[in-house]
Amino acid sequence: MTSELPGTNAGRRIALAAVACLATAPVLAKPDYSMLDDLLLSHVDNGFVDYDGIALDPRLDDFIDQLAATAPEDLSTPAEQKAFYINAYNAIAIRGILDGQSPDSLFGRSRFFKRMRFDVLGESLSLEDIEHGRLRPMGDARIHFAIVCASLSCPRLASRAYRPATLDAQLDTAAEEFLNDPTRNVFDSNRRVAYVSQIFDWFEEDFVANAGSLQNYMARFVTDQASARVLRGENFEVNFREYDWGLNGRWSR
């Protein structure tokens, strides 16, 4: 047996082995929702976002990079597609705030929802594209309680990513929490008056398509049984509350 000098055959074999390992390493085909979980758990408290903390956390941009690296064929089921787009929307909305965008004015909303664009599944998409062009056509009105546009009247941002395997339960939870949040919706069964989020006005056709009427839809998730009964009887006077576009930052309370 002959010895081999460093940098000759032995060195070449080591280099080739390293290249082979890289070539056979698994390629990430879908976003790492565990990383998004960790990011949200670290910086979201009861729906309020620590934007300063996220600004210093590289995981947000890492996740957004994965939105671009994912291919449409990597999302083979409706649940995978729906979870992907919900998570993409929420991550991009956060990135928009960090980039100095804001929906707190009419002009700001145009920039935030329509002009701000990111690479998602190989396409340049805006928040409006994701909501109206990708999520709403899926026909599940619960998405309106899961996507969060960084405003106080939006649904509270979940502290965990949406995942295909648990998506149905997560969306039910999001709907129930939103409907029964008195800072967003109030149901007075004695007076038969409801004061509800403008989300129900803006997207009424989605809720009607899912339940036959707006009141029937709300009755599915309202936990107060007296209110639910009156809602099902279509006997509530429904009023829409003014939308608060203020930032859902941790110190905005």
Image (cartoon, rainbow, N blue to C red):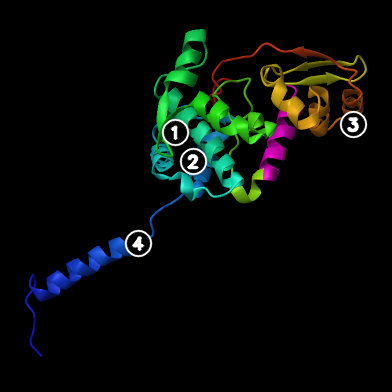
Sequence-first tag of 1 and 3: 1
Figure quadrant of the C terminus: top right
Tag of residue 25: 4
- Give the distance between the C-alpha atoms of the residues marked 2 and 4, in whole angstroms: 25 Å
Q: Is residue 58 left or right of residue 128?
A: left
Report which residue position mark 2 lands on.
39
Q: Is residue 164 visible?
A: yes
- Amino acid at the residue labelled 4: Ala
Question: Counting other residues with Cα less than 10 Å from the Cα at mark 1, is it few (<14), some (14-19), or many (20 or more)?
Answer: many
Residue 188 image-quadrant placement: top right
**Which image quarter is the N terminus in?**
bottom left
Report the side of 19 relative to 125 (left or right).
left
Q: Which x, y percent locates residue 62? A: 39, 41
Residue 27 located within the stretch drawn in magenta: no
Under circle 3, the secondary element is: helix
Q: Are marks 2 and 1 in contact (CB under 8 Å)?
A: yes
Q: Which residue shows up at 52% across the image and 9% down it?
A: 106
Q: How far across and down, in percent of the image, does residue 191 sit?
A: 91, 14
Q: Mark 3 sits on what residue?
A: 225
Q: Which mark is residue 54?
A: 1
Identity, as a three-letter code, of the amino acid under mark 2: Leu
Magenta stretch: give its range.
168-182
Whether residue 46 is visible = no
Give the mark, 2 or 4, whose residue is nearer the N terminus: 4
175 vs 160, nearest the viewer:
175
In reply to whether residue 175 is colored magenta, the answer given is: yes
Lateral position of residue 175 relative to residue 137, left or right: right
Eye-nearest disc, 1 or 3: 3
**Reading the chain from its start, which is encountered first: label 2 or label 1?**
2
Q: What kind of residue is marked 3?
A: Gln
Where 172 falls versus 124 (above or below)?
below
